Image (tube, rainbow, N blue to C red):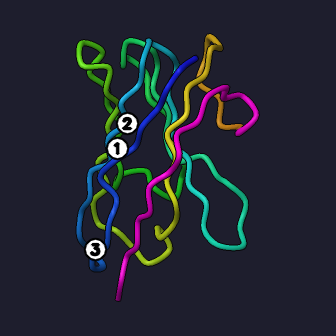
Amino acid sequence: QVQLVESGGGLVQVGGSLRLSCAASGTYIMGWFRQAPGKEREFVAGIGRSGERTVYADSVKGRFTISRDNAKNTVLLQMNSLKPEDTAVYYCAASVRAVIFRLVGAYDYWGQGTQVTVST
């Protein structure tokens, strides 16, 4: 059983930065998703097993950076220039598939989520 534990969420002002961390047991395709109140869970970013390939949602491209340190079994999401619309619960997810997918259903394991709130 893969265990994923997120940390690093919190309250930040518009334009600020946060860094989310996900401790993952094993090496998988990893993704970050988010879910705002009343909305469906959406893809934010994904990274390949060796970190050589990354994929981003258009809404975060240029502001967020996903990275991983396989020696520490950690995946990071650096979030800069945060906007109120980035407010959501952020989830780390792991996929056993060979490529990065943007679909929720392509991920097999999920963390418990961490709240990110961007205030005006």
Q: Earlier in the sequence, mark 1 or mark 2?
A: 2
Q: Position of residue 25 (x, y in %)?
A: 42, 18
Residue on which disc 1 sits: 77
Label 1 sits on a secondary structure element that is strand
Above or below, 85 against 23 in this view is below
1 and 2 marks in contact (CB < 8 Å): yes
Which secondary structure, mark 2?
A: strand
Query: Looking at the rendering, in which quadrant would you find the C terminus?
Result: bottom left
As measured in the structure, the alpha-carbon distance from the residue carrying label 3 to the one carrying label 2 is 19 Å
Number of the label disc, if any, that sits on residue 22: 2
The answer to whether any part of residue 96 appears in the image is: yes
Q: Are the residues flagged by discs 3 and 1 in contact, CB closer than 8 Å?
A: no
Kind of residue indicated by mark 3? Val
Q: Amino acid at mark 1?
A: Leu
Query: In the rendering, at what x and y percent does residue 114 appear?
Result: 44, 55
Is 76 placed left or right of 89 in the picture? left
Can see residue 56? no
Q: Could you tell me which quadrant the N terminus lies in?
A: top right
Q: Residue at x 45, y 27 (%)?
A: 47
Quote the CA–CA distance across marks 1 and 2: 9 Å
Are circles 3 and 2 on residues that touch, CB within 8 Å? no
> Which numbered disc, 3 or 2, marks the residue that appears first in the sequence?
3
- Disc 2 residue type (three-letter): Cys
Q: Residue, x 55% and y 26% (percent of image)?
A: 94
Residue 101: assigned label: none
